[in-house]
Image (spheres, coloured by chain):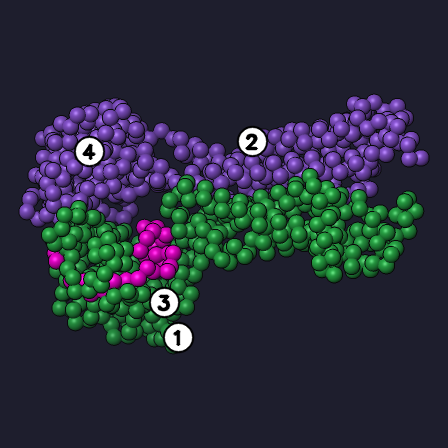
Amino acid sequence: MLEIKPIFNALRRSKVGAILLLIQIAITTAIVSNAAFIIQDRLTFLQQETGYPEEDIFTLSVMTFGKDRDLSQQFEQDEQMIRNLPGVVDAALTNAVPLSGSGSASGMRLTPSSEQTDRNIRSAYLQGDDHLINTLGLQIDEGRGFRADEVIVSQDRSQISNVAVVTRTFLEEAFPDGDGLGNTIYWGGAPMKIVGVINQAKGPWLHDSRPDNLVFMPTVRAANYQHIVVRTEPGQRASVMRSIEDQMLTAYDKRVINYVVGLDEHKRQYNASDTLMMRMLMVLIVVLIAVTALGIFGLTLFNISKRTRQIGTRRALGARKSDIVRYFMVENSMICIGGLVIGCAGAVFMGQQLLTHFSLPALNPWYVVMTALAVFAITLCAVILPARRAANISPSVATRSI
Amino acid sequence: MFVHYLDLGWRSLRRTPLVSLLMVLAIATGIGITMTSLSVYHMMSMDPIPHKSTQLYHPQLQTMDDGEESWSEDNLPYQLTYQDAKNLAESEFPVNKAAMMRSGFTLHLPDSEVRPTIENTRITHRPFFALFDVPFVYGGPWTQEQAEAGNAVVVISSTINERLFGGADSVGKQVYLDETLFTIVGVTAPWQTHMKFYDVNNGAFNNHENIYIPFELIEPMSIDTWGNTNGWKFENIRSFKDKLASEVFWFQFWVELPDQQAKQRYEEFLMAYMAEQRELGRYNREQLQFGLRDVNSWLDYRNVVSEDNQILVALSFMFLAVCLANIIGLLLAKFMRRAPEVGVRRALGASKRQVFLQHIVEVSLLGLAGGIIGIGITHMGLWGVRISQEYYTPLATMDLSMLLAAPVIAISACILAGLYPAWLVCRTTPATHLKTQ
């Protein structure tokens, strides 16, 4: 019915063209399935929920060079001033900015000793006063937040708070039995009782091995180079950001305000290389498919012009237009399926190579299957137009030149 | 003859404009995509200081107790402790060596209305400038005497000099770094290296610091780092003094060892130094261990070329292969259709070699056109890279070698693609085709 045998025989006589097409389809399948998988991987990464209302939060950095004022006191006043600005919901000092790619992390232990054998749980930590959690737009989902009297304001590094609020992920890793709330963790030998749990809050590094582990400590240690985080009413952020430098310098001028940046912008900068990779792969896929499709289109067009007389003869002998179209479709499908089989094997092989040489997750076989189907569909589309043109060749062409 | 071939090639391309266009577009996009990722790769992996890269070494010392793990692949810490940095810098051999770290200050002029700015600062020893051949516009590095006396002296970049002094010779003038008055001793000229190879901790492609001050000021001024600090054991660090005496790593260190002999001597020196320190109670381990890598192996070791970029380069070359397969197919079809014409030429006395060459010239023409359009596409691609990732701005450019590489790759790829079709067409026997005419 499909005349596979004669088509195959005809193909064997023009091997090279068919093989070239086959190679093209194979490489295209291998590249596209792997690239599509990497794109999907990055897309999931870029769109992940962070737990923060990123559009309403911004941060600023303050570098103080004046030595005539007490830093802790000055920043206490600054916090009050910012909180009272119109449009501001809350503000707090922080030792690090979430999602920004810079911060502090440590191994939290479950016992006071610092023996090597002890299990320690890697976690980032944020230090600030009782306003910090609210400023970041986070909610305590279990337990309680910090009380004002628990906040330690000191430049002395040895004074460490004795309570902590942690993320759910951290709690479950530290206390898998579910008895974490109310239990104690140790940071460099100092005990901290877990008083509250936040369901979701990402740490400073989305690429960290533990991006969801975050411990909040009610400690304010004003530094010469200090970050302040501010949350505004929705839509008010831009205007507050514009005026904040002047407001801060009016309060005290022996300092420099810089890096007034939205939290979403922090995230965008941290993720820039992933965004770039994704975009480049997208361009690659689109162009690759276009080139392959155009190639098939061009090649079929040529084959048809080469076989004009043959087609005319077939038509004269009674072949219908649909037979001619089918001939080209079947011929192309045969090459395409051959290419796809090689391409799928190539895709899996390439996925393994990428897995061993680079830190990429293992290729999901569904991507290979979906890509193969898509490539098949696209090649058919690329053939149908020239095949229709071939079908329109008049039978008289065959007789004319005899 | 060549001009004649060019003419024939041009006519032939014009006879099938659609197919020619398809082929040129295929090679152009192939070149465009490949050159975009290759240009970034080229800039990332380029030797930052070619005339000296085999003479500059970064030593690493294994200070950690037995059984402690670092992040690096060979378990050596990337940076040095303050004690080691200071001790290694005080040794007599070799001459050019410098410890360094990144910090920052607010910069402002005395009695100025201009708002102070925050500036990244490199704290280092005097030989830093000689080590890396840092060019100067005015003045030069501070003297050893100034450094040892703890004088507040500073070298600024021409960017800062332009902003504060309008580009005039500012040597001898004074600026405030935080609340300390510093005297300018030198102004550096723009530094022609795109990579901060001497400190890759916080991104190898960030800008160079604009301010340099002596390492000797760290203790009196309590200057802490703005770069990375890594520890491996719990140390109760309460004050800056504690940090200086601690085992945390926060310094980079470079030495210039002009030949193999010097390198060997330095290796022996490092071993002797560690043995001496072990006597003093540090280096609590069985086997003393150090690392000594030159610039390029250091960059390789620190994985300066991003993984994503390597993947992209590999993928884009595969893409180029697809474009080539495409072109071979089209050329084959095109050339074979012209077989009768070739038959006539052969019958009129053209040799196989001439026919072959003529077709190679024709595909080279395709390659040239594709390469030139490809450069345009590459520039578009690099522009896209720059707007996606500001950090890559110094990398997303085509230097001269890449600009020349584009048409060379395009033409050789096209010739490669044209070999088989051209060979096939020059084999045509004149008789068969003459018969059908």
**Mark 2 or mark 4, which is nearer to you?**
4
Label 1: how many residues lie within 10 Å, few (<14), some (14-19) or many (20+)? few
- Name the residue tied to disc 4: A243
Which range is magenta?
A: B180-208
The kind of residue tagged 4 is Ser
Q: What residue is disc 3 on?
A: B56
Q: Which chain shows up in green?
A: B
Q: Earlier in the sequence, mark 3 or mark 1?
A: 3
Q: Distance between the residues labelled 4 and 3?
A: 48 Å
| Picture quadrant of residue A205 | top left
Q: Name the residue under label 1.
A: B259
Looking at the picture, how far across and down is residue A148, in whole percent? 11, 29
Residue shown at the point (32%, 33%) measured from the top left:
A264
Label 4: which secondary element: helix
The answer to whether the residue labelled 3 contacts the one labelled 1, judged by CB atoms less than 8 Å apart, is no
Query: Relative to B161, is A23 above or below?
Result: above
Residue flagged by tag 3: what amino acid is it?
Answer: Leu
Residue under disc 2 on the same chain as residue under disc 1: no
